[in-house]
Image (tube, rainbow, N blue to C red):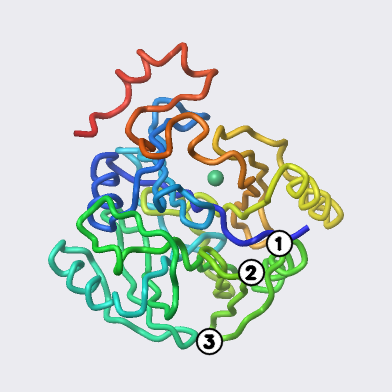
Amino acid sequence: MSSAGIHHVTAIAGEARRNLDFYTRTLGLRLVKKTVNFDDPGTYHFYFGDEAGHPGTILTFFPWAHSAPGRIGIGETQETMFRVPEAALGFWTQRFIEHGVHHDLPKKRFGETVLTFQDPDGMRLALAALPGIGGEAAGRSDVPAEAAIRGFHGVNLLVADAAPTAAILTEVLGFREAGRDGSLVRYKAAGEGPGKVVDLHAAGDFLRGRLGKGSVHHVAFRARDDAEQVAIAAVLKERGIVPTEQKDRNYFRSIYFNEPGGVLFEIATDEPGFAVDEPADHLGEALKLPPFLETRRAALEKMLPELD
Ligand code: ZN
């Protein structure tokens, strides 16, 4: 029983077209799946990632045009961090200036140079410039391959007290403590590759977060397959945390639970991936629906907002 790190992060956006444009054109991620929110099928569900949508690279959104802005607070993801090659930071700073992306001056965090910025809905993001990272670059925008985003670095969770969340990370999800920087404690999953970092920011008595556009809804961690997910669920139950029943998300299978710090966590299987219902070189081009919604396709297509 151990997770190999982050599988995906799911957030709430405002207008769908603007969200799509920012992540594919400005950031150069690939839209690897265009589907609907299975629990609210009048809403899109966009999945952005690397070329294949590997676990650890996938940022997903529910775009709700009329959503009120969220407010960062306790029990929420405060920042979602991507990885870029060390030499690419100048490119990104220049690009953010040219595209009018709200960003800050680079800063050092855990010895890494980090460029923090926001998406058009105010979601807090960061690029961590890291030496020696390879991985697949999306290559479908004007972002040159050598500067492209290489999946997630990780997430930063705002909690009242770090210890209960840290226990879930280290005793259930296979992370280990990897350092402290000011009020942040870093946890790392084993191995190389994207999505290995969770930073906990213990803020004590502070307002709870409020979900809305620009907010992260949940963070999903990886399970190799159903058996590993069952093993993780068993360890959670021993600790008095009962996850949901498994839900079939078509591209992975998921269970959910609230970790003791208040953040909604998911355990998602690496299987079967995004090429299960369309060819790998055409990911994200057509609206894909799960079998139980296919009979409603015509009505849903009318209800969903225009994208071009
Ligand atoms: Zn999810």
Q: Which residue is mark 1?
A: 173
| Residue type, numbered disc 2 | Ala
**Residue depicted at 77% across the width and 52% down the height:** 232
Other-residue count near label 3 (Cα within 10 Å), few / some / many at <14 / 14–19 / ≥20? few
Label 3 and label 1: CA atoms lie apart by 22 Å
Query: In the image, residue 7 lies at what x, y percent?
Result: 56, 53
Label 2 and label 1: CA atoms lie apart by 8 Å
| Residue type, numbered disc 1 | Leu
48 relative to 159 in the view: left or right: left
In the picture, the quarter occupied by the C terminus is top left
Front residue of this view, candidates 162 and 273: 273
| Residue type, numbered disc 3 | Asp
Task: Check whether the beta carbons of the residues at disc 2 and disc 1 lie within 8 A of each other.
Answer: yes
23 relative to 38 in the view: left or right: left
Query: In the image, residue 276 lies at what x, y percent?
Result: 52, 33
Query: In the image, residue 269 lies at what x, y percent?
Result: 64, 45
**Residue depicted at 23% across the width and 29% down the height:** 306
**Rendered view: 151 above or below 271:** below
Query: In the image, residue 234 lies at what x, y percent?
Result: 83, 50
Q: Earlier in the sequence, mark 3 or mark 1?
A: 1
**Ligand 1 is in which quadrant of the figure?**
top right
Other-residue count near label 1 (Cα within 10 Å), few / some / many at <14 / 14–19 / ≥20? many
**Rendered view: 106 above or below 174:** below
Question: Which circle marks residue 181 in the picture?
Answer: 3
Q: Which residue is mark 2?
A: 189
Label 2 and label 3: CA atoms lie apart by 18 Å
